[in-house]
Image: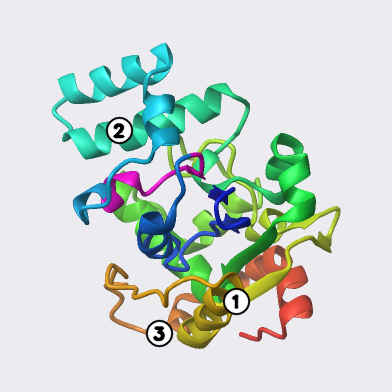
Amino acid sequence: MIVSHNQRFIFIHCRKVAGSSIKVSLAPCLGPDDIMIGSWHEALRSNTRLNKQARRTLLHPLAMKTWLTHRLAGNDSASAINEAIKTRYVHRGFANPPHASAAEIKRHFPDEWKRYFKFCIIRNPYDRLVSEYLWRTKNTNIKVSFRDYLKCLRGERFYPNLLAEGETHTWNMYTINNRVEVDYIGKYENMKSDLRKITEHLNLPRLTLSHVKETGRDRSYREYYGYKEREIADSLVANECVAHGYEF
């Protein structure tokens, strides 16, 4: 998530849409009081300096304690800084700060929500679910089938540490009470042209996404779905498909 008072925009970071790369590219444009949560470790490794707001956040005792804990655990300074900033905003009431929902952002920044340009990027939800599954199982080392992962998202299974704390469905990240609440929705499939429209609207330099991660996938997302997987996924992504014209 980014709340830019300097450029008067709010970026909602939906999952698996190169959101971290977008934040890294936007980070040099941040003003002193702008808020960016998540992806600071990648921004720092790309030679972007912490802005004044991030430095203030790190001075909070809870953030300092988190930074020290991660450093003592052997994590590099950039990763420790990123975790410290996220922890501070969890303490302020965000369930999952880097992927804060529209409702949370509106609650914490009501005036900015009314006045700033709000945007996000979305992705074919069937493709996104596979990308999320592969990313989570790789990073958690949890052995779970794609079908059971979908059941976990639907609340029918539980695997400790598989899902992020406070996780919500992508649809709920940019809607409130099933109503779209952002000003612009770009699509992952049209990333370059949609980002160009966004940056032109905000009068920002054109973004170069040089940090987009490879999927590492060796087959089409469709091959992960059988009849049962489609049935579960359909129930999870119906709203997105209807609203944005996505199909399997």
Query: Reading the chain from its start, which is encountered first: label 1 or label 3?
Result: 1
Q: As rendered, which of 7 and 151 lies closer to the eye?
A: 7
Badge 2 crowding class, 10 Å Cα cut-off, few under 14, some 14 to 19, many 20 or more, is many
Amino acid marked by disc 3: Ser
Q: Are marks 3 and 2 in contact (CB under 8 Å)?
A: no
Residue 9 lies in the magenta-colored region: no
Badge 1 crowding class, 10 Å Cα cut-off, few under 14, some 14 to 19, many 20 or more, is some
Image-based side of 232 in relation to 220, left or right:
right
Name the residue beneath numbered marker 3: 220
Residue 38 lies in the magenta-colored region: yes
What residue is rendered at 24% in x and 18% in y?
68
Residue 234, percent from left and from top: 69, 72
Marks 2 and 1, how far apart in space? 29 Å
Report which quarter residue 135 is drawn in.
Answer: bottom left
Amino acid marked by disc 2: Ile
Residue 238, percent from left and from top: 75, 71
Q: As rendered, which of 74 and 191 lies closer to the eye?
A: 191
What residue is rendered at 13% in x and 28% in y?
74
- Magenta residues, as a range? 33-43
Report which quarter residue 24 is drawn in.
Answer: bottom left
Q: Which mark is residue 81?
A: 2
